[in-house]
Amino acid sequence: MRKSIQFELWHECNNLCKMCFLGLENRVTPTETKIRSLKEAIEGAKTFEGDIIAIIGGEFFQGQLNDPEVHSLFYDFISIVINKLNTKEIEVAWVTATLTDKTPKDLIEFLNFIKENWNGSGELLICTSYDTIGRFHTEQKRLNWEENMTLIHQMDSRIGLNTTMILTNDLIEKYLNNEITFLDFTTKYNTGIMIKHPNSGPYKTLQEMEKALPGFVPERKNTLHFFKKLKLKEQFIFDTCVFNVNRRADECIKRNNNGQSYIDLRDKLGTNEYARDDERSQTMPCGHSSLYRCYIDSDACMKCDFLAIRDE
């Protein structure tokens, strides 16, 4: 098994997605917190011995690097990661980006830096998200995302793209109504995909999440139809992209609400699941995380439903 580490640099994000844990509150991270975080990440990256380095926020390419010292330290950190790829000390590096701003200058600078400094060894990815509900507050935001996906591929086609989609009831209905197909999506945007289960995000319960964002939490009957159709029509997606958590890190350097870092060690359960450092997650009798109890109308385990249809 490959060893991985994930650096959560800060929480700052200006997208205000209702379903996100960062969601409605983390609009600004103090500059001194960013500086401290980046200095810790630099030291952590230097000493890391393993296979995968992941970099998550918050957001990085929508004005979060405006402070000169933050900008300098960020690229010092990226330089270390890229050098580890170039010298084959690690196999994979990835960074998250929402890509919803109109041609952000920070993203273009990052892509130019990668083009100039990465020799192509290993695998470098930008990981993003696309959701049919809750992600794009305006149609322009969605169009910006599409343009930025194209921009990345045009500027450096060596960079891999991976897109997470939350299995919302809205996505399920659009798929059942033939409004979206995943193979077409992957071809159009030159991206891999990961379909993940929904959760209650910043809310305590799924019911509160559904009230805040109607159509988000799936119904079980719809979901079973979705799995069956996906297996029949797009078996490659069914087999490789649903609930695939292989890119999750074994160790995550995270931040609390005060910007202090702590290590979240993710214990693997026997069914390729990771236990979360979260009071809402326990192991159910079936062996899966209780986060898979994520239907609006049933206490059934979504992962068990998926596996049952896989094995039919």
Image (cartoon, rainbow, N blue to C red):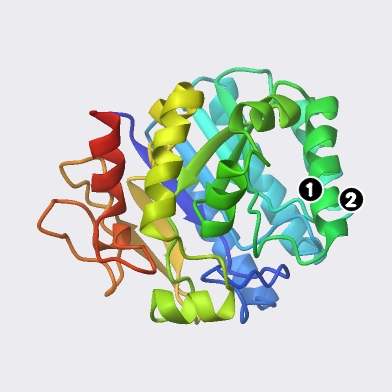
For the residues marked 1 and 2, what is the alpha-carbon distance in whole angstroms? Answer: 14 Å
Q: Is residue 47 visible?
A: no
Where does residue 193 sit, x and y in percent of width and height? 56, 36
**Callout 2 secondary element:** helix
Using the image, determine if residue 83 lies above or below residue 147: above
Q: Residue tagged by mark 2?
A: 105
Seen in the image, is 84 located left or right of residue 222?
Answer: right
Where does residue 142 sit, x and y in percent of width and height? 80, 53
Camera-nearest residue between 16 and 140: 140
Camera-nearest residue between 170 and 143: 170
- Name the residue: 9% across, 57% down: 285
**Callout 1 secondary element:** helix
Query: Could you tell me if the residues under marks 1 and 2 are in contact, i.e. CB atoms within 8 Å?
Result: no
Displayed quadrant of residue 125 = top right
Q: Amino acid at mark 1?
A: Trp
Disc on the earlier residue, 1 or 2: 2
Q: Amino acid at mark 2?
A: Lys
Categorize mark 2 by other alpha carbons within 10 Å: few (<14), some (14-19), many (20+): few
Q: Residue tagged by mark 1?
A: 145
- Name the residue: 67% across, 27% down: 184
Categorize mark 1 by other alpha carbons within 10 Å: few (<14), some (14-19), many (20+): many
Where does residue 63 sit, x and y in percent of width and height? 81, 63
Using the image, determine if residue 45 lies above or below residue 101: above
- Name the residue: 29% across, 31% down: 310
Where does residue 229 sit, x and y in percent of width and height? 46, 34
- Name the residue: 71% across, 67% down: 15
